[in-house]
Image (cartoon, rainbow, N blue to C red):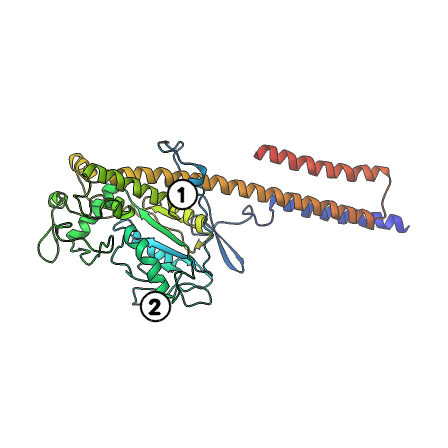
Amino acid sequence: MEEKFNRLIFIPIAAVLFLMIGYQYVCPADSNTCYFRSDDKGLFQRSSSGFELVYTEPEADEDLPSKITSKFNFTERNLDRHVDFKIRGDDVMVFLHIQKTGGTTFGRHLVKNIQLEQPCDCMAGQRKCTCHRPGRADSWLFSRFSTGWSCGLHADWTELTSCVPTVMNKRDKKSVQKNKRNFYYITMLRDPVSRYLSEWKHVQRGATWKTALHMCDGRSPTEDELPACYSGDDWTGVPLIDFMSCPSNLANNRQVRMLADLSLVGCYNMSSVSELERGQVLLASAKANLLNMAFFGLTEFQRKTQYLFERTFGLRFIRAFTQINSTRAASVGISEKVRWRIEGLNALDVELYEYAKELFLRRYQYSRQKQHQEERLRRWQERQQRQRLHRTYLSELWRLGGGGGEEEEEQMKGLEEVATTEDYSSQVVRW
């Protein structure tokens, strides 16, 4: 009688158990399968300890082309970008802000939009934010909106690499010899023609950047080395033709100049090497520095920039980046002849941007593929864990049910074989 009662109890318990197991297959733990999208495109939100933001597929207009034209031989090491950024340690993120590349917007993301244990303290009415490490009063970020222009207005690679370590150690009262830091340089780049037109419109409205130091090899350039393009306080109202006609205009090839090591060509002394050799050396230096930077983004790909930053540093933004195409540069109508002239004046920047764009898109593609592989591995491990639990539960129920005849034993073996076969089949389909 007792044995019959145990078997009757076993049947409904087994049924409930199989329903639970079936639900786990459909809606596995830590999966997005059964979550609904929020109003913020590209983000999922879930309540746990606070909230978690997970980047998903980009919007349709930012999809990768079906085939990326391969011109440069990038290795897997060039594409695999991950930084073990120790925000609790002494690591410093250094933002190299090139004019008119969307750097102001990106700089604000860094101080106001990153999910941090100790967020940056941004007071209303103040230009700078305090970005301290958790539990410490020293900064993890060197940028316009955190430390200000501590190495000069829009300091370039040459200036920053010689200035930042000293400035940061003075600020935090550390000894350079005793405290070796990691400095992770990041920047933003933009299509050269659009960037050039944007700078022209900015200068036309009165911008000068005349307080920039342009330090190189311990000194600023002389007036003979870097003559002014205008007389007076600024260049307000300058026509585009005049803007393009000044040979010492720093808008020309600005991105290459600001990313290269200028000491390789005698800084701003144009007579040290020929113009052709100077251009080749600066371009090669800019490419090498860009390749070795911890991260760079492209103004034209905001969501991909967000995704790659998050994957590189293991940090998450709170709100999604927005792609804004209605810029002042976009509203400027120019003829093909003028466009060719601008491209000629920025020939080095054009080549650098072509290099940067392919590297950026290949890094994005590589990172997406790697993320998908990680997710497949995680799901496979979850299934293996659920199957182990499944077998444990069945064994326990079998024991509580007092065992059974040969027929029931064969059914139990059959259930285990089916579970294993289904898991193998699903992997074959996915692989």
Quarter holding residue 411: top right
* Picture coordinates of residue 140, whole percent (x, y): 40, 60
Mark 1 in CB contact with mark 2 (< 8 angstroms) = no
Q: Quadrant of the C terminus?
A: top right
* Residue at image mark 2: 123
* Residue at image mark 1: 59
Q: Residue at x 69, y 44 (%)?
A: 387
**In the drawing, does residue 374 fall left or right of residue 172?**
right
Of badges 1 and 2, nearer the viewer stands 2
* Picture coordinates of residue 30, whole percent (x, y): 57, 50
* Picture coordinates of residue 204, whole percent (x, y): 15, 51
Between residue 226 and residue 43, name the one nearer to us.
226
Q: Residue furthest right?
A: 1
**In the drawing, does residue 265 fall left or right of residue 1?**
left
Between residue 87 and residue 112, name the one nearer to us.
87
Between residue 182 and residue 154, name the one nearer to us.
182
Question: Which amino acid is tagged 1?
Answer: Glu
**Label at residue 253:** none
Asked if residue 350 is positioned above or below residue 393 in the image, the reply reads: above
Mark 2 nearby-residue class (10 Å; few <14, some 14–19, many ≥20) = few
